[in-house]
Image: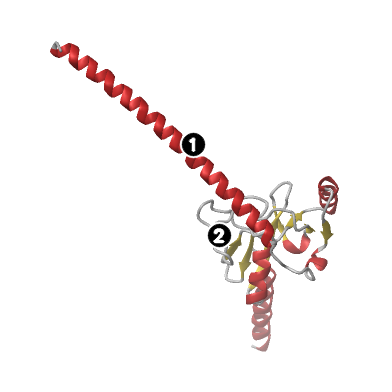
């Protein structure tokens, strides 16, 4: 009897350990649907997207690695199973602790935190050399990083988005004017045909 109880206890212990060690896979980004849990902006399906999975299996997605870090700072990590970032080059998902990071305030990210993720140190080093600026950070170094948004960069990106939006509006306005002119000419043609039919 005691032996049976011992076996059951061991099985329960093993099952509990297996559940604890299970790492949930990342979920796909649903474009135009998923919003950042921290800032409520739409999450882009690119190298900026990050996500964490809770122990209950739910995925929380973020548009910027800085937003994910800020969320963890606010809510703690007790309920977090795993955090994922995406490789800048391939956009493949990487467990955050396994990634290498680069930072510069002029690197453009959705919320202007200026941090990119790489699956290898070599790719991160090559990127910094190509850009001629930036600081390489290991995961351990990233934990001591001061997460601040570059508000000047945010302002610049918003202005550029505004100009881009107005540019599209101008194009749409010109297209609409062109369509109206065609309709007008088309209407005149119909008028002439009607005049011939009625003998006017």
Q: Nearer the viewer, residue 91 or 113?
A: 113
Secondary structure, mark 1, is helix
Q: Badge 2: few (under 14), some or many (20 or more) residues near its Cα, within 10 Å? A: some
Q: Dot 1 corresponds to which residue?
A: 171
Residue 19 visible in the displayed image: no
Decide: is 128 above or below 173: below
Decide: is 53 above or below 91: below
Residue that lies at the very extreme toward the front in this rendered image? 200
Residue in the picture at 74% in, 55% down = 116
Find residue 7 and report its image quarter: bottom right
What's the image's color scheme?
A: secondary structure
Give the image location of residue 155, x and y in percent. 63, 57
Give the image location of residue 124, x and y in percent. 82, 52
Pointers 2 and 1 in contact (C-beta within 8 Å): no
Secondary structure, mark 2, is loop
Q: Nearer the viewer, mark 2 or mark 1?
A: 1
Give the image location of residue 77, x and y in percent. 67, 75
Find residue 16 and report its image quarter: bottom right
Residue in the picture at 68% in, 55% down = 109
Marked residue nearer the N-terminal end (2 or 1): 2
Give the image location of residue 138, x and y in percent. 82, 62
* Tag shown at residue 41: 2
Residue in the picture at 45% in, 34% down = 174
């Amino acid at each position: 009897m005691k032996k049976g109880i011992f076996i059951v206890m061991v099985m329960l212990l093993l099952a509990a350990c297996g559940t604890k060690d299970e790492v949930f896979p990342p979920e796909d980004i649903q474009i135009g649907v998923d919003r950042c849990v921290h800032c409520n902006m739409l999450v882009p399906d690119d190298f900026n997207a990050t996500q964490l999975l809770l122990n209950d299996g739910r995925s929380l997605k973020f548009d910027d690695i800085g937003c994910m870090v800020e969320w963890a700072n606010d809510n703690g990590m007790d309920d977090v199973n795993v955090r994922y970032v995406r490789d800048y080059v391939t956009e493949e998902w990487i467990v955050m602790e396994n990634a290498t990071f680069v930072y510069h305030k002029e690197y453009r990210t959705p919320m202007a935190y200026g941090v990119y993720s790489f699956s290898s140190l070599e790719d991160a080093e090559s990127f910094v050399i190509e850009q001629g600026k930036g600081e390489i950070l290991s995961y351990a170094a990233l934990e001591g990083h001061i997460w601040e948004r570059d508000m000047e960069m945010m302002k610049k990106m918003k202005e550029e988005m505004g100009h881009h939006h107005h540019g599209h509006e101008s194009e749409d306005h010109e297209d609409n004017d062109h369509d109206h002119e065609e309709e007008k000419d088309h209407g005149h043609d119909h008028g002439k045909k009607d005049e011939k039919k009625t003998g006017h």
